[in-house]
């Protein structure tokens, strides 16, 4: 019953096989011929390479330089004999932190500091030796901070 009428020639250029075509959608005699002639789609050519994401820096390069300088200066400052004891009246605890009586952050306090390039955080003229307990207390207690420094709690002026 198989006549030459029913036999189709494979569409593959490298293959001249004759076969019975069971489906009009399959013009090839074998899977190998079909695979060899398959059109490459854009989806197949894309290779997804996921790069490991770099985390956002916790501080900028400029702030990192200031922080490193502050850490070194703080150790030297607290090592001096006159800066061994907390500056709060009645407290005889060992000073292990620095209280910035005029704040810290961007900018300079005056033209002199600006000419020297000393930012607010590194300006030792306004540093006071302080124990950790009182340093935290100055942030929380408005009355204590009124007596010694500016506080966000009371809005007074710095010394």
Image (cartoon, grey):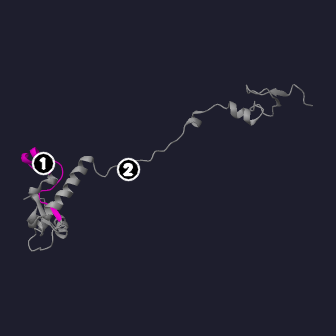
Q: Is residue 47 left or right of residue 146?
A: right
Q: Which residue is mark 2?
A: 55
Left or right of residue 49, residue 5 in this image: right
Q: Is residue 31 magenta?
A: no
- At x 16%, y 62%, the residue is 98
Q: Classify the position of the C terminus by image quarter.
A: bottom left
> Residue 106, percent across and down?
18, 49
- Residue 71 drawn above or below residue 136: above
Occupied quadrant, residue 77: bottom left
Q: Where is residue 24 drawn, in percent x and y?
A: 77, 31
- Element type where label 1 sits in the image: loop
Disc 1 residue crowd, few under 14, some 14–19, many 20+, Cα 10 Å: some
The circle drawn on residue 108 is 1
Is 67 rendered above or below residue 87?
A: above
**Magenta range:** 97-119
Mark 1 vs 2, N-terminal side: 2
95 vs 34, nearest the viewer: 95
Which quarter of the figure has residue 103? bottom left
Q: CA distance from mark 1 to mark 2?
A: 31 Å
Task: Residue at 32% x, 50% y: name it.
Answer: 57
Q: Is residue 152 visible?
A: no
- Name the quadrant of the N terminus: top right
- Residue 146 at x, y = what percent? 10, 64
SS for callout 2: loop
Q: Residue at x 8, y 66 (%)?
A: 82
Q: Is residue 107 magenta?
A: yes
Which residue, as the protein is rendered here, is positioned at the far right? 1
The foreground one among 159 and 80 is 80
């Amino acid at each position: 019953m198989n006549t030459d009428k029913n036999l189709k020639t494979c569409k593959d250029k490298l293959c001249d096989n004759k076969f019975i075509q069971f489906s009009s959608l399959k013009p090839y005699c074998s899977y190998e011929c079909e695979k060899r002639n398959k059109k490459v789609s854009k989806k197949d050519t894309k290779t997804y390479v996921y790069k490991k994401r770099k985390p956002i820096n916790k501080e900028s390069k400029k702030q990192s330089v200031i922080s490193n300088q502050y850490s070194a200066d703080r150790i030297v400052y607290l090592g001096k004999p006159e800066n061994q004891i907390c500056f709060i009246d009645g407290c005889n605890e060992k000073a292990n932190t620095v209280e910035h009586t005029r704040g810290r952050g961007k900018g300079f306090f005056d033209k002199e500091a600006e000419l020297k390039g000393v930012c607010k955080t590194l300006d030792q003229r306004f540093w006071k030796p302080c124990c950790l307990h009182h340093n935290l207390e100055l942030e929380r207690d408005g009355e204590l901070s009124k007596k010694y420094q500016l506080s966000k709690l009371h809005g007074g002026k710095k010394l």
